[in-house]
Image: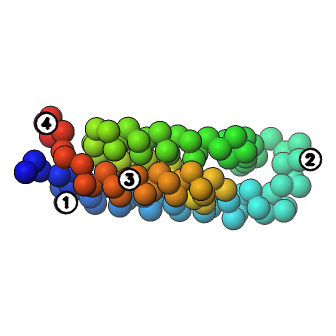
Amino acid sequence: MSPRFLPSARTTNWLIVVGFLSLGYAMYMRYLVIEQSSVGLACDAGLNTWLCLSRRVMSGLFNHQVFGWTALGAALLNLIRPSAALFAIGLALTAFGVVLYNAPLAALAAGLLIVSFARPASAIE
């Protein structure tokens, strides 16, 4: 039986860091930047700061389901050919998608990331 895709302990620690950092930043963006009415009023009034720019960029991305579709794409690629880098990208985008209003597609991507642990490891690793 061929070995399954299972990241090493060191890689798993990095994946945990990537997951928590992206989840934390997505929660910061949603609850303290996007949904905060005082920030929204200031940005709509013409305030030109990095916070308003990031608010506009994030709003544009989640309005077009970019986080969900890219998370799904990375998870599908990881399912086809598992690697730690693709898993990290899929994990980060899934965290952003779940928090930033792209939950159905990001949840499907999370399921595909979990299923990728059942796939055989690539020969390069």
Q: Amino acid at mark 3?
A: Leu
Say what secondary structure mark 1 lies in. helix
Q: Nearer the viewer, mark 4 or mark 2?
A: 4
C-beta proximity under 8 Å, tags 4 and 2: no
User: Helix, strand or loop at disc 4?
Assistant: loop
Determine the image quadrant of residue 86: top left
Closest to the observer: 49 or 12?
A: 12
Q: CA distance from mark 1 to mark 2?
A: 49 Å
Q: Is residue 7 visible?
A: no
Q: Which residue is mark 1?
A: 9
**Residue ID at (53%, 62%):** 24
Can you identify the residue that label 3 sits on? 113
Q: Which residue is mark 4?
A: 123
Residue 43 image offset from top left, x and y in percent? 84, 48
Q: Secondary structure under badge 3?
A: helix
Q: Position of residue 113 (x, y in %)?
A: 38, 53
The three-letter code of the residue at mark 4 reads Ala
Labels 1, 2: front one? 1
Task: Specify few, some or many for label 2: CA neighbours under 10 Å numbering under 14, 14-19, or 20 or more.
Answer: few
Q: Earlier in the sequence, mark 3 or mark 4?
A: 3
Residue type beneath disc 2: Ala
Which badge, 3 or 1, comes first in the chain's sequence?
A: 1
Numbered circle sitting on residue 45? 2
Q: Is residue 79 or residue 21 the one in the foreground?
A: 79
